[in-house]
Each structure stands twice: as C-alpha cells, then as structure tokens.
Image (tube, grey):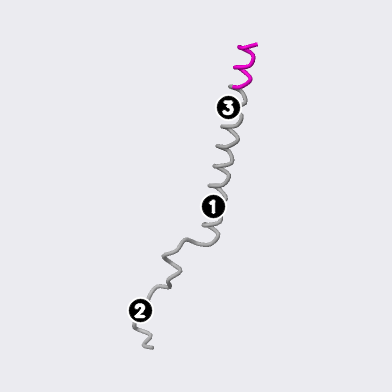
Amino acid sequence: MDPSTPSPPPPRHSAPAPSGGLGAELRESLLLLGCAVGVTMGLTTAAQAALSVLS
C-alpha cells in the first residue's frame, strides 16, 4: 500500500449515520402518532357535534 495513493472512501459514508436514522424513524413515528391522535380527536368531536344536533 503506497501512502501517496488516496484510499477509497469507506462505504459507510454513503449511508446515513445510525443515530440520524434512528432519529428520523422516531420523528416519523411521532408524526404518524400525532396525526392519528388528531384524526381521532377530530372524529370524536364531529361525532359529539352530530349527536348534539340530532338529539
């Protein structure tokens, strides 16, 4: 191995960092959870409004 020859970049460089990947997954799951909670609360509110109008 000649020290003047540039070494090829490690293959890990092309992939995202493990910690960054975990953070992105956590953020995505929290976003989906927030959307699910928002939709559920919206449907509950709409159902309550419909019941109060019908009664």
Please count the marks in the image: 3
| Residue 34 place in picture, x, y as percent | 58, 38
| Amino acid bearing label 3 | Gly
| Amino acid bearing label 2 | Pro
Residue 6's tag is 2
Q: Is residue 49 above or below residue 3?
A: above
- Residue range corresponding to the magenta coloring: 47-55
**Within 10 Å of the Cα at label 3, are there few (<14), some (14-19), or many (20+) other Cα atoms?**
few
Q: Is residue 35 above or below residue 46?
A: below
Q: Is residue 50 above or below residue 19?
A: above
Q: Give the labeled residue for mark 3.
A: 42
Q: Residue at x 61, y 29 (%)?
A: 41
**Residue sitting at the far bottom:** 1
**Between disc 1 and disc 3, whose residue precedes?**
1
From the viewer's perspective, is the residue at label 1 or at label 2 nearer?
1
The answer to which quarter of the image holds residue 13 is bottom left
**Between disc 1 and disc 2, whose residue precedes?**
2
